[in-house]
């Protein structure tokens, strides 16, 4: 952050050099001391009154259709064929030879290959008649809130590059994640929490933290992972045995020392910012655990998300937490669930994965709806790519699975502004390639930004010699996906 | 001139004059001369031809031209069409009324609905919108194509730059504002301003500018502040109390006394650790390869140490370039030169069964082309990968010509004995890894035996030969009769075996770091079978056989499968004397032979005739000293980068750099001896300063800075007395946040081994530059204090103040254990409490506490001691194993895998709260406050 152009851009955003000097997190800005501290964890802290910080609210480019986003990341690549895009043609071709050639193939896609059918039949559900395979038992309840999209094509069949692509718009890590762009563009309603929160699996995805990195955007827009085990935010609490009062004493001495020091350097406002940051952190460390404590929710709600049931507990907890975060004004929540990479035994593997997410996701949509939050929340469900209609050498029975496929996948959207109750786009007879309403990932990104009130072409940041944007070089919103 | 105007008038389209001049010979047909040259043009006509038309062409015609798709039924390619308007508006052009015309209004972006061009990145500057307005106000005249060309010829501003040529003539002959071409100008030593009273050339330039803007510089920093500044600057650590005392007591002049300090610091081996780290930021150093497996690169550390040695030995920077880009070709017998080529392999790279070999090869080529541009020439070349550079005179052809320099560059893990100047102690990790290897081998053997038994039984039952499944398949046994994979094993066992096998392969590969290999390259044909990550690559017997010699092409749109025109290796043709199509010399021509390309290219880079390289490096040096460069985008000297705040100073330094024999240390001496470097950060009339110099680039006062992540950790270790001064060696394994260390980390089809810190404090408490940097597992303490991710080249550290920093430094383990260690050391070395507090201040701040401070800190110690007396703490404990539960992706069944953490056997922990008494713990609280204080974390 030291180029003139970057500074000029900050000024464009209504900030200034002096603010740039004091840009510290969660944007309490210059007036931290005067902000009503009691309201700290409440929604919509008086951001508008405070001097604009990096997370302060910004005016959207377009009328927003949704305010927040919950992004459900099915890591590993769910099979479109065995979830929402059934291909009965494969039943006829099952175990017949399949040939693929060409230079642009990975080793995984070559060799002796066979068509494989889905282990499940599918049926049409809801008024819209969307297709779902048998294992989806709960999601049919909310079919008509969903817009299924079968036209997206990814570019890579390698997990980390494909994940980077769907998360950051670039196949190689290091660029800002979608959630970073959104919080950069819109700010966040809660100035005391990160604007972009990630609920990862205990085991981070391939490629690791760059999947939610801020890239060249300022550090304030980085995704903050809330860890499922151990301390949710690293070092949120002091060492075991040290009480808050104990820490307060240390903090008092620190405040005194920093205050004396400030007198010698009265012009350096970053010193002041850093002092205020300690006070903010001290309050956060007491209040964040409360926010994360989903046991405060009533039994019905917990039941709705499948909490307490072995299959659904893990993802259910994440989604209930996602709802709580969105309620508190967190702009963008991304929840991961893994295990979709079913090269073998797709019946068992995908069966278990669908069981794990079916009820929690349905619960989330119902819960948001009953609280009147669904219309303000954009829900995205996708993996990093789809799966192939064929499989390598397997010995029949239930052992077969599917390999990676960048050319076809199903993703779906629900909530604010989406064309609920529709199925958009189509794949070919065997589900190998998207053939109708075909768009690259960047167009999906542009659409998501659009729904959130952001114009990809105007959401830019100067870095490395040019104005960069999520779509890299521009893209088109997909009108069919929007209501 | 006459001949030229004839051609102009013939030409059906507007071409820049230079193009026409080049074509004149072919097109000069007599008899068509019109009288345009006699005509005098109105200001409006000139404005149109020179400014407005090019702007329309660049920004509007793509959608509102006469092409296939016309947006909004609006055509802007002629005055008549403009007057017709589009489907929604008629008043696109109202001649004489600029502000009323939509053409102007829409470009101001102040309208709600129409903001043109639609892409924010393409937006017009305010000045550009005024051009449109003024043209319309002038009646919107639209001279003929011929007249436009004549106006261009007579009045055009800007410069056509000679390059190897763009993808089209429009680009080749486009004009650049002169101010954007500063970096390509010949490098000539400017005259040092003589008016200035000071004798120091740096100050002569700086002060002249200060005089110009009417600012008086701040006075000098006091010696105590200055030695702290210089010590952090050069070695990244605070000065020792005795060093401060020596400087304070030095009776020599301030200049002389400070020069002594600078010389001492430049001779300190920790200098190379600090300044080598800056270079490692630029080259994106990491110990691992990134992507799905994130394999540890067995020999990356030898390159890291090479960089540190290069700075410590003040290796001439031209040699530094030659060795990194072409060491294997330049000095093939010099181990240093071979290790140095690790530079070319610093990017993330992986090829597996799930990637496409040609794509990953191209990824390397793109990566290396770009980093060579950024690191040495301050030009990110990737912008020219898909199209000629939008703003700078970098043709795509040059991008692929430079890429062609590396087309014969192949990866190799060279056998290269450890040298006596390399550190090869600290191989204790080997034992841990060997134990892990045995453990996984046992698992594999046990489970394979179990499976074999089951397969044998199966084969007998099915009446088929007892062979492996693959062999049976080859024999044509039908699928149904083949023994299923993992036969006889439970789902649990299948999962464990898979994790075990992966770890076995991985550990075996990564243990090569204990062997004498160098991460290096050679020149030759591309191997027939593409490399697969996770295997050592031996030097082929004959680098010229067994594969294809790769030709190089311009790749359309950057797509590796879209080969365009073939290119031969070349240099960046825009630089003076570098365009061999005009004037081929040894200097600017790269041989197309398989070997020698990189050497020729490196010689071009490292030549005093190269105007970018010395400017780039002196600017980096300056930027690390002052916290901002003379050009404040050290990786980008192009039009979109910053402009030099002191262009003559930059050129002065660049020419001196070459005269000094490319000595970086000489540059430090020159810069640090200036008054500008030695100024105070405090400025009396701050309002005036901020108003006159809002970007703080006039150097009227010195800019204070926060410690970097590495400096912060190292300084705490230094204050506590724990810092191990050992230079170089294998990646060190400090303690990191335990939650992160033990967090399962996915790699392709398995989990990576947990991060386990080294067993002894000496091995852990190394300088941070030596800490293992795995792309997929960064130390969260480093990350939160803005250590850049090694995915991209970092030209300057960010310095954000974010709340997680408080959690890390106030609650986290680094500051806790350093505080306890500091307390123990202070108590051991001091008799009275008073002297404990005094020494803490001296070590951390380089000064004595005031009387008030002393009593305040003593009181706090007492107070906290009373609190601590009632408290008991558990001693630290370390897990011997960690259990992972996972879903076996291949089967969908869950399994549990218990990883033994051999690294924690016989672990020697740093003392924790449970290991020390209340007095020590209370003093540790005092130390914790000091480590968190602004005085500790800022340098003035």
Image: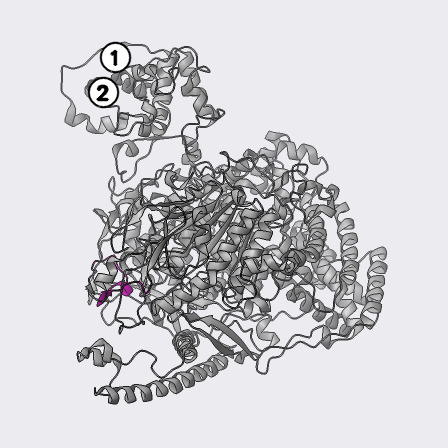
**Pointer 2 chain:** B
Asked if the residue at tag 2 contacts the one at tag 1, i.e. Cβ–Cβ closer than 8 Å, the answer is yes
Location of mark 2 (residue): B8
Q: How crowded is mark 1: few (under 14 residues within 10 Å), some or many (20 or more)?
A: some
Between the C-alphas of marks 1 and 2, the distance is 10 Å
Measured from the top left, where is residue A312 in percent x and y? 51, 64
Residue B528 within the segment the image draws in magenta: no
Mark 1 or mark 2: whose residue is earlier in sequence: 2
Q: In this view, does B147 lie above or below A190?
A: above
Answer with left or right where residue A256 lies relative to residue B209: right
Q: Is residue B609 visible?
A: no
Q: In this view, does B255 lie above or below A390?
A: above
Which residues are the magenta region? Answer: A102-119
Q: Can residue A103 be seen in this view?
A: yes
Name the quadrant containing residue B869: bottom right
Q: The residue tagged with tag 2: helix, strand or loop? A: helix
Name the quadrant containing residue A163: bottom left
Q: Residues within 10 Å of mark 2 (few under 14, many from 20)?
A: many
Residue at the (66%, 52%) spot, across then down: B939
**Pointer 1 chain:** B
Location of mark 1 (residue): B36
Answer with left or right where residue B13 lies relative to residue B508: left
Residue A113 within the segment the image draws in magenta: yes
């Amino acid at each position: 952050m030291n180029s003139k152009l970057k500074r000029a851009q900050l000024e464009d955003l209504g900030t200034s050099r002096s603010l740039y000097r004091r840009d510290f997190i969660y944007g309490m800005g210059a007036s931290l001391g005067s902000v009503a501290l009691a309201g700290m964890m409440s929604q919509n802290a008086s951001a508008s009154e405070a001097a604009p910080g990096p997370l302060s609210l910004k005016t959207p480019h377009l009328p927003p259709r949704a305010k927040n986003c919950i992004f459900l990341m099915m890591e590993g690549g769910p099979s479109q064929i065995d979830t929402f895009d059934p291909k009965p043609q494969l039943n006829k071709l099952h175990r017949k030879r399949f040939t693929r050639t060409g230079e642009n193939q990975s080793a995984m896609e070559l060799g002796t290959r066979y068509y494989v059918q889905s282990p499940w039949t599918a049926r049409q559900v809801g008024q819209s008649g969307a297709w779902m395979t048998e294992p989806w038992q709960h999601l049919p309840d909310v079919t008509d809130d969903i817009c299924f999209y079968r036209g997206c094509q990814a570019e890579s069949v390698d997990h980390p590059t494909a994940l980077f692509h769907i998360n950051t718009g670039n196949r190689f890590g290091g660029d800002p994640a979608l959630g970073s762009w959104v919080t950069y563009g819109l700010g966040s309603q809660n100035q005391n929490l990160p604007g972009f929160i990630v609920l990862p699996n205990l085991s981070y995805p391939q490629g690791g933290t760059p999947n939610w990195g801020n890239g060249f955007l300022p550090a304030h827009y980085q995704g903050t992972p809330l860890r499922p085990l151990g301390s949710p935010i690293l070092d949120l609490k002091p060492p075991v045995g040290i009480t808050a009062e104990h820490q307060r004493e240390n903090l008092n001495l620190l405040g005194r020392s920093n205050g004396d020091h400030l007198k010698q350097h009265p012009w350096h406002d970053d010193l002041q910012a850093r002092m205020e940051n300690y006070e903010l952190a001290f309050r956060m460390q007491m209040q964040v655990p409360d926010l994360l404590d989903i046991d405060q929710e009533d039994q019905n709600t917990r039941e709705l998300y499948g909490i307490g049931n072995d299959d659904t507990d893990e993802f259910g907890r994440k989604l209930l937490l996602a709802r709580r975060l969105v309620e508190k004004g967190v702009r963008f929540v991304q929840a991961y669930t893994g295990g979709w990479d079913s090269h073998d035994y797709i019946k068992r593997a995908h069966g278990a994965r669908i069981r794990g997410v079916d009820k929690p996701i349905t619960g989330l949509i119902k819960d948001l709806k009953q609280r009147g939050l669904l219309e303000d929340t954009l829900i995205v469900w996708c993996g990093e790519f789809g799966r192939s209609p064929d499989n390598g050498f397997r010995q029949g029975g239930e052992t077969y699975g599917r390999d990676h496929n960048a050319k076809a996948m199903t993703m779906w959207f629900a909530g604010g502004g989406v064309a609920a109750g529709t199925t958009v786009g189509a794949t070919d007879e065997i589900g190998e390639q998207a053939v109708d309403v075909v768009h690259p990932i960047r167009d999906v990104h542009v659409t998501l930004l659009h729904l959130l009130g952001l114009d990809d072409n105007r959401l830019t940041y100067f870095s490395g010699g040019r104005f960069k944007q999520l779509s890299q070089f521009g893209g088109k919103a997909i009108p069919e996906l929007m209501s | 001139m006459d001949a030229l105007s004839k051609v102009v008038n013939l030409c059906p389209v507007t071409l820049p004059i230079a193009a026409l001049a080049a074509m004149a010979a072919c097109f000069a047909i007599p008899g068509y001369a019109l009288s345009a040259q006699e005509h005098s043009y109105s200001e409006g006509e000139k404005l149109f031809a020179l400014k407005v038309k090019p702007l329309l062409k660049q920004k509007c015609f793509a959608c509102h031209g006469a092409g296939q798709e016309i947006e909004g039924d609006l055509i802007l390619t002629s005055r008549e069409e403009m007057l017709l308007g589009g489907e929604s508006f008629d008043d696109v052009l109202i001649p004489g009324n600029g502000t009323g015309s939509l053409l102007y209004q829409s470009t101001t972006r102040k309208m709600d609905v129409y903001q043109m061009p639609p892409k924010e990145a393409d937006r017009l500057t305010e000045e550009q919108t005024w051009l449109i307005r003024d043209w319309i106000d002038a009646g919107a005249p639209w001279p003929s194509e011929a007249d436009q060309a004549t106006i261009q010829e007579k009045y055009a501003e800007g410069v056509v730059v000679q390059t190897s040529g763009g993808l089209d003539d429009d680009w080749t002959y486009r004009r650049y504002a002169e101010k954007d071409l500063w970096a390509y100008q010949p490098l000539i030593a400017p005259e040092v301003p003589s008016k200035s009273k000071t004798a120091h050339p740096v100050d002569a330039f700086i002060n002249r500018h200060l005089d110009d803007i009417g600012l008086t510089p701040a006075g000098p920093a006091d010696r105590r502040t200055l030695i702290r500044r210089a010590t952090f600057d050069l070695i990244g650590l605070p000065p020792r109390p005795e060093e401060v005392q020596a400087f304070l007591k030095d009776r020599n002049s301030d200049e002389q006394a400070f020069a002594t300090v600078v010389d001492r610091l430049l001779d300190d081996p920790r200098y190379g650790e600090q300044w080598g780290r800056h270079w490692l930021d630029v080259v994106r150093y990491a110990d691992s390869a990134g992507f799905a497996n994130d394999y540890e690169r067995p020999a990356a550390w030898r390159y890291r140490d090479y960089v540190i040695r290069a700075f410590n030995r003040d290796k001439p920077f031209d040699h530094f370039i030659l060795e990194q880009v072409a060491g294997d070709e330049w000095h093939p017998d010099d181990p240093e030169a071979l290790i140095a080529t690790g530079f070319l392999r610093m990017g993330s790279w992986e090829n597996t069964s799930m990637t496409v070999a040609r794509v990953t090869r191209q990824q390397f080529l793109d990566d290396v082309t770009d980093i060579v541009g950024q690191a040495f020439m301050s030009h990110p070349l990737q912008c020219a990968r898909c199209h000629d550079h939008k703003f700078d005179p970098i043709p795509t052809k040059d991008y692929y010509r430079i890429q062609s320099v590396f087309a014969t560059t192949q990866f190799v893990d060279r056998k290269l004995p450890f040298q006596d100047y390399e550190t090869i102690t600290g191989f204790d990790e080997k034992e841990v890894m060997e134990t892990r290897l045995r453990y996984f081998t046992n698992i594999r053997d046990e489970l394979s035996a179990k499976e074999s038994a089951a397969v044998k039984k199966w084969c007998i039952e099915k009446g088929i030969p007892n062979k492996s499944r693959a062999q049976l398949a080859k024999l044509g046994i039908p699928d149904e009769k083949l023994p299923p994979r993992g036969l006889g094993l439970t789902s649990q066992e299948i999962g464990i075996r898979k994790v075990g096998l992966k770890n076995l392969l991985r550990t075996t590969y990564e243990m090569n770091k204990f062997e004498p290999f160098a991460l290096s390259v050679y020149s030759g044909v591309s191997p027939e079978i593409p490399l697969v990550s996770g295997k050592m690559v031996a030097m082929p017997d004959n680098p010229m056989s067994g594969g294809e010699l790769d030709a190089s092409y311009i790749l359309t749109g950057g797509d590796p499968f879209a080969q365009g025109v073939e290119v031969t290796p070349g240099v960046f043709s825009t630089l003076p004397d570098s365009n061999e199509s005009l004037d081929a010399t040894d200097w600017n021509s790269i041989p197309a032979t398989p070997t020698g390309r990189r050497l020729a290219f490196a010689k071009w880079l490292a030549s005093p005739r190269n105007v970018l390289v010395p400017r780039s490096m002196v600017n980096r040096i300056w930027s690390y000293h002052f916290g901002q460069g003379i050009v404040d985008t050290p990786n980008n000297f192009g039009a979109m980068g910053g402009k030099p705040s002191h262009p003559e100073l930059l050129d002065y330094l660049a020419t001196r750099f070459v005269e000094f024999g490319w000595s970086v240390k000489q540059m430090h001496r020159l810069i640090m001896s200036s008054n500008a470097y030695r100024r105070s950060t405090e400025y009396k009339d701050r309002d005036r300063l901020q108003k006159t110099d809002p970007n703080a680039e006039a150097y009227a006062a010195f800019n204070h800075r926060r410690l970097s992540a590495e400096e912060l950790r190292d300084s705490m270790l230094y204050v506590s007395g724990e810092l191990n001064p050992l230079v170089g060696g294998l990646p060190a394994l400090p303690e990191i946040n335990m939650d992160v260390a033990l967090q399962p980390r996915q790699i392709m089809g398995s989990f990576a081994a947990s991060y386990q810190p080294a067993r002894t404090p000496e091995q852990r408490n190394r300088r941070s530059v030596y800490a293992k940097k795995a792309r997929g597992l960064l130390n969260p303490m480093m990350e939160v204090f803005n250590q850049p991710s090694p995915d991209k080249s970092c030209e300057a550290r960010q310095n954000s103040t974010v709340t997680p920093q408080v959690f890390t430094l106030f609650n986290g383990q680094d500051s806790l254990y350093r505080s306890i260690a500091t307390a123990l050391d202070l108590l051991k070395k001091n008799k009275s409490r008073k002297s404990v507090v005094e020494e803490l201040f001296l070590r951390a701040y380089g000064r004595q506490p005031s009387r008030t401070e002393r009593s305040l800190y003593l009181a706090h110690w007492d107070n906290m001691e009373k609190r601590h007396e009632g408290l008991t703490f558990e001693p630290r404990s370390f897990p011997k194993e960690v259990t992972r539960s996972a879903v076996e992706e291949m089967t969908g069944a869950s399994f549990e895998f218990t990883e033994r953490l051999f690294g924690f056997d016989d672990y020697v922990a740093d003392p924790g709260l449970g290991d020390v008494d209340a007095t020590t713990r209370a003093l540790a609280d005092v130390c914790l406050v000091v480590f968190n204080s602004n005085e500790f974390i800022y340098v003035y």
